[in-house]
Amino acid sequence: MNTNNTTTTITITYDDDIVRKFMIASIFWALVGLGAGVLIASQLNFWQANFNMEWLTFGRLRPLHTNAAIFAFVGNMMFAGVYYSSQRLLRVRMASDLLSKINFWGWQFIIVCAAITLPLGYSRGKEYAELIWPINILVAVIWLVFAANFFWTLAKRNEKSIYVGIWFYIATIVTITMLYVVNHLSIPTSFTHSYPIFGGVQDALVQWWYGHNAVAFFLTTPMLGIMYYFVPKAANRPVYSYRLSIIHFWSLVFIYIWAGPHHLLNTSLPEWLQTLGMLFSLMLWAPSWAGMLNGLLTLRGAWDKLLTDPVIKFFAAAVTFYGMATFEGPLLSIKSVNALSHYTDWTVGHVHSGTLGWNGFLAAGMFYWLAPRLWKTKLHSVAMANAHFWLGMVGILLYVASMWVSGITQGLMLNATTEGGTVLQYPNFLDTLQAIRPVMLFRAIGGGLYLAGYFMLAYNIWKTARSGTPVNGTVEITVEEENASEKRFSTFLNAPVIYSALIVFALCLTIFSNGALFIFGMFLTITFIIVAIAHFEFCKASWNDWYEKLLKHGFGFSVLTIIAAAIGGAVQIIPTVTMQRADNIEGRIQVPYTPLELAGRDIYVSEGCYNCHSQMIRTLVPEVMRYGDYSHLGEYVYDFPYQWGSKRTGPDLAREGGLRSDDWHYFHMLDPRSVSPGSNMPNYPWLFKKPIKVKQLPNKIHAMRMLGVPYPIDLSEEDIQAQIDEQAAGIVARLAEKGAFTDPDKEIVALIAYLQKLGTYELTSEKDEVATK
Amino acid sequence: MFKRIIYDDWTTIVPIISFWLTFGVFLAIVVRAMLLKKNAVNHMENLPLEDGDSSTTNAHNK
């Protein structure tokens, strides 16, 4: 920076009003999200809790619960923490109060839209990415508003150095933007419906690249930034090792993005991707524990406060849960462990030890620390905060322990064989469900206790706010006045920043293009790297200088972070997209859905059936014995979105077609217990009343054709209607023979058509042309 | 029956390359962190404690 500067003292008043707003919103949505969680946990035990109402079924409320917990509760908490700590670490008020307000009200509007559309069944059918496309655009816009405000503040800062907490915020902003945009690329068919541009294995890979990294860059990196600011503040001690925090940051950002495929182990995902996912998940142990140890050791010397100070209690427990969850995650990513744990409650328990223990407790600690400062008063009741801690702790332990027992029990039962391994010991899936019913009840109780703790927090914070007055923090600082134009240009016009930007541009060109542009992008990437190295050597620069230049400029640092985070995604996604194009379908190709089956599939997605049923038979002997031949890549090429699922509360449906009669499905959807005694599935009486949305089908088929599904180009609306009428008439006739009556235009007919199609494929070899299973 | 078909052999090398790439990044960052000057470390690690916020209190220890 300029050395011929004058100094001046200025008073800064921070915008803490926005922090208060986000904090209150977070607490409110925590109660909603956790409440929804307790309700759906109860539904798993008592099917009557679905109330026979379409907008209150497990399949529709589970996305509401996850979205509310992630984006509403933790999202608002993250904004509160980022706005509070960034202003203080950068020694400047947020650049624009207007952008802050747009960020706040826009985000709340998005949450309200989600809370309305999800129970109504408007869903994209991808976990944590269920919101429909108009809301996706709104999310992107509001996120960019936040990003603009943040980077503008960064540019205006009065502190030259960028603290590691701010690094984590930058990583969050740039990476979430990349992940969210790619995973939400869709072709709209109406204002409330769209199909993702990726299908089958591509969609699965992109989804879990996003889904896993939503955990990484929405539920972890901003929380780590918050940890690196608030834990030293609470302990009144500097971070244990700043050097360790640097290693923690870069290795975490670089490694995390690669680990997504561990959600798809033993599936038909190509083997090399599975290996990559497992390998990088195991490597995550190191950076995760570096962060955990750094956080815990920061509290050294403050352990005496653990007895009296609820803030320290919550922080210590949160960081400990971070350590435990990040130990368990890699463990579950080992293929042999995953063979047991995947599709069971073990994964659910793992996720909740992270969200309730790490995110929820960190949020509580931060709120208890912030409230007295934001309202310039004392916390209403320390005793109540302590009681909240213990109630929450018992709740989490009860929840997580019961999910471990449930997951391991069900996993072992599903894989158990007898007669020398030739016969399944528990061939009836419902036997395994009945075995875990009692522990599932404990899960609901544990969640209820945790929710009760958050009600105590809400009351405590409300009473605290009522007893004080809202204040905005102020600080006097001495700053150097620089030549404005010099400062502006120096931000962008320096070698490492320019080279980094050019390399990112070339990488983007490579990732998002094909053919000649793809090769050109590769050429540019290699060229820029070589030129950068040559420049570096020629001017005898030092790595330290270039690195410092990047660190001192938010823009350059962000570019560096994008590079670190993009490499993993590029390595995994580009070959997968290319491979499927090259007829990599393992000898089988899916038979496209008829218009009626497509309508049925959209009902399946809308009802959220994927929340309890998978459509993926893994390459494991017990699975093949239970469900049939393992799933091949080519059997999913026309699935937009893919529906492999992540949890089996009910059995896999990949080869459901033809397995049972039409009337079995009819009665099962009307009252599951009439044909499956002991089932916890909701009744779906509205499927027998609501008409099929036929008018939307031409648009949907047109979109499918754009995505490469071989529907005839000259398929008219009349043709579509005729095909629907013919297929529906056949189903209705078969149902009538068994005493099951319905009109051919009802949703149940389309859903039966879809379920009977599942698992239908053609062999690609010339010898076997006919579709069989 | 359970033999997985690998269509693109070159991709099997990707995990190995990726591992060494990551190891290289990790090593570079470790070296960089170790070479950081003591006064720079002191300045950075004390940033959260130096915000001098006049509105702060120790109010929660009721």
Image (cartoon, helix red, strand yellow):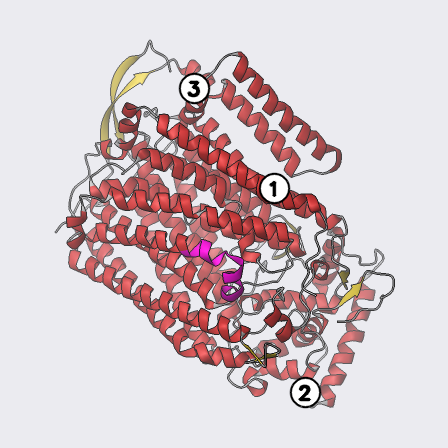
Q: Position of residue A718 (x, y in %)?
A: 82, 65
Q: Which residues are magenta?
A: A328-343
Q: Are marks 3 and 2 in contact (CB under 8 Å)?
A: no
Q: Is residue A569 above or below residue A681?
A: above
The chain containing the residue under callout 1 comes to A
SS at badge 1:
helix
User: In terms of image quadrants, where is residue A73?
Assistant: bottom left
The answer, for residue A243, to whether it is visible in the render is yes
B28 relative position to A612: left or right:
left
Question: What is the spatial separation of the Cα atoms under label 3 and label 2, in whole angstroms?
Answer: 77 Å
Question: Which comes before the other along the chain, label 3 or label 1?
Answer: 3
- The amino acid marked with disc number 1 is Val
Residue where numbered disc 3 is placed: A545
**Quarter of the figure with the N terminus of chain A:** top left
Q: Amino acid at mark 2?
A: Ala
The structure residue drawn at horizontal position 56% and vertical position 20%, both measured from the top left corner, is: A533
The answer to whether dots 2 and 1 both sit on one chain is yes
